[in-house]
Image (tube, coloured by chain):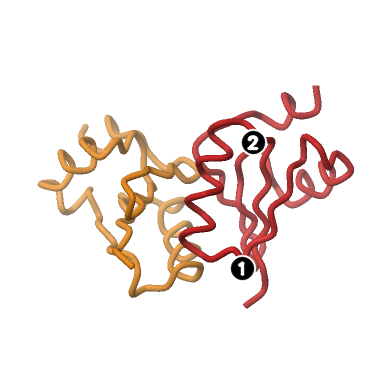
Chain colours: A orange, B red
Amino acid sequence: MAKSIFYHAGCPVCVSAEHDIVNLIGADNVELVHIGEDRNRIAEAEKAGVKSVPALLTPNGNVLHINFGASMADVKG
Amino acid sequence: MAKSIFYHAGCPVCVSAEHDIVNLIGADNVELVHIGEDRNRIAEAEKAGVKSVPALLTPNGNVLHINFGASMADVKG
């Protein structure tokens, strides 16, 4: 199975959701990207349709926005 | 693994998220509950912390609100 990508910004909501997602789909099936630190991946996330974090980009290209930690504007600001 | 419960209300956002969740964690690992039709489970969902649908209740009791289809008030209305 192709990997999903979990975009987050280190916020408490993000960390909690990350643990849940890793438990549910397995650490081997998801790449974890901290776009607050790895800022050159912000554009990639936005292009994929990520509007807020935490968000999970599925292998087929859908974005699941999970709960609400921060908007992309907050991450960039 | 204990099952997760995916609460939804049949809305387009719900159906799309349901397909993604089933693909990610496997149909055997998630119970699908349509609280628009199975209305006697609305109270259970609210008690678990579901504030909008679609939402995934994980085996450890966390609620992941996924995208946004409808608020619980809309479902009950």
Q: Nearer the viewer, mark 1 or mark 2?
A: 1
The C terminus of chain B - image quarter: top right
Q: CA distance from mark 1 to mark 2?
A: 21 Å
Which amino acid lies under the numbered mark 1 shown in the image of this protein?
Asn
Label 1: which secondary element = helix
Task: Name the side, left or right, on which B65 lies relative to A47.
Answer: right
Name the residue carrying label 1: B29
Q: Looking at this rendering, what residue extends furthest in the right direction?
A: B40
The percent position of residue A67, horizontal first and vertical second, equals 50, 43
Q: Nearer the viewer, residue A31 or B51?
A: A31
**Marks 1 and 2, the one that precedes in the sequence:** 1
Question: In the visual, does B60 lie left or right of A16?
Answer: right
Letter of the chain that mark 1 sits on in the rendering = B
The residue shown at (38%, 51%) is A56
Query: Which of the 4 image quarters holds residue B42?
Result: top right
Same subunit: marks 1 and 2: yes
Callout 2: chain: B
Q: Which residue bears the numbered disc 2? A: B52
Percent from the top left, x then y, of residue A36? Answer: 22, 48
